[in-house]
Image (cartoon, grey):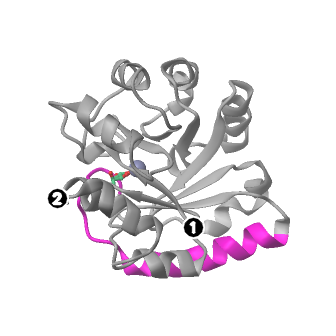
């Protein structure tokens, strides 16, 4: 059964508490929180104060996806705000190994996110140090985009790399996940499905989460 992480980017920001309760009471496993800086990606979302406020109501782990330049400047702040898993983008981390060590030393799980055009092979030498690979299946920046099909083969390659190295890294798919494509992604080796638009635009959000988890269309 996959881990389901609803992306709060598509939640109702006028009533976050209601959507947090929905996730709390659903079969979702994590909260996926997308932090954007208007520099690495075109969009700007939210940061530490909002995450800290959400933490007071949320009863499931916070999977924080940083789409920001120089993420290392804020590791400690995100730990304090309540991040349980903290992912940095490969594309902004010239010192990826160091970043992973620092994230873990602050008591969080360490994740690496990669853009659709970034080969998974670039992670080979640090795969044993990565708790989660967030594989982007859209170009980061916005919710509700269409899944980029060329990213599917990367799941299989990454899975093989993880198996060969004996690591216990989880593979997360982020962007354009639907109840239609979810079963195929799991078959290829995905462990975690992020879903924003699919969950929050549906009329019965908890039921959509359930269908993603049990892979029913
Ligand atoms: C995109 C974000 C995603 C996004 C997914 O930059 O990283 O987490 O919220 O949204 P959907 O599921 O709507 O594609
Ligand atoms: Zn994300």
Q: Main secondary structure of the magenta part?
A: helix
Residue 121 spot, x, y in % from top left: 66, 68
User: On the rendering, which quadrant does ligand 1 occupy?
Assistant: bottom left
Identify the secondary structure beneath mark 1: loop
- The residue located at (57%, 80%) in the rendering is 188
Quadrant of the rendered structure where residue 206 is? bottom left
Residue 106 spot, x, y in % from top left: 68, 24
Q: Provide the residue span drawn in magenta.
A: 140-164
Quadrant of the rendered structure where residue 162 is? bottom right
Q: Observer-nearest residue: 26 or 10? A: 26
Which residue is disc 1 drawn over? 1
* Residue 206 sits inside the magenta stretch: no
Residue 105 spot, x, y in % from top left: 74, 26
Q: Observer-nearest residue: 125 or 190? A: 190
Q: Is residue 108 visible?
A: yes
Is 175 drawn above or below residue 188 in the view shown?
above
* Neighbours of disc 1 within 10 Å: few (<14), some (14-19), many (20+): few
* Neighbours of disc 2 within 10 Å: few (<14), some (14-19), many (20+): few
- The residue located at (39%, 77%) in the rendering is 216
Identify the secondary structure beneath mark 2: loop
Is 144 drawn above or below residue 6 in the view shown?
below
* Residue 158 sits inside the magenta stretch: yes
Which residue is disc 2 drawn over? 203
Label 1 C-beta lies within 8 Å of the nearest ligand 1 atom: no
- The residue located at (27%, 62%) in the rendering is 198
Q: Is residue 42 visible?
A: no
């Amino acid at each position: 059964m996959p881990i389901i992480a609803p992306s709060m980017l598509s939640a109702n920001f006028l009533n976050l508490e209601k959507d947090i309760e929905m996730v709390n009471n659903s079969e979702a496993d994590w909260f996926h929180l997308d932090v954007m800086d208007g520099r690495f990606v075109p969009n700007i979302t939210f940061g530490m104060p909002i995450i800290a406020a959400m933490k007071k109501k949320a009863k499931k782990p916070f999977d924080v996806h940083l789409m920001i330049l120089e993420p290392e400047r804020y590791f400690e702040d995100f730990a304090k705000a309540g991040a349980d898993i903290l992912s940095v983008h490969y594309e902004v981390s010239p010192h990826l190994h160091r970043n992973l060590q620092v994230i873990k030393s602050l008591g969080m799980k360490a994740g690496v996110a990669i853009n659709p055009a970034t080969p998974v092979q670039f992670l080979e030498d640090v795969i044993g140090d990565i708790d989660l690979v967030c594989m982007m299946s859209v170009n980061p920046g916005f919710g509700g985009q269409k899944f980029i099909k060329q990213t599917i083969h990367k799941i299989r390659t990454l899975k093989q790399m993880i198996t060969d190295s004996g690591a216990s890294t989880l593979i997360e798919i982020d962007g354009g996940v639907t109840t239609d494509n979810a079963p195929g992604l799991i078959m290829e080796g995905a462990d975690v499905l992020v879903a924003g638009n699919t969950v929050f635009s549906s009329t019965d959000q908890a039921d959509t989460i359930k269908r993603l988890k049990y892979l029913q269309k």
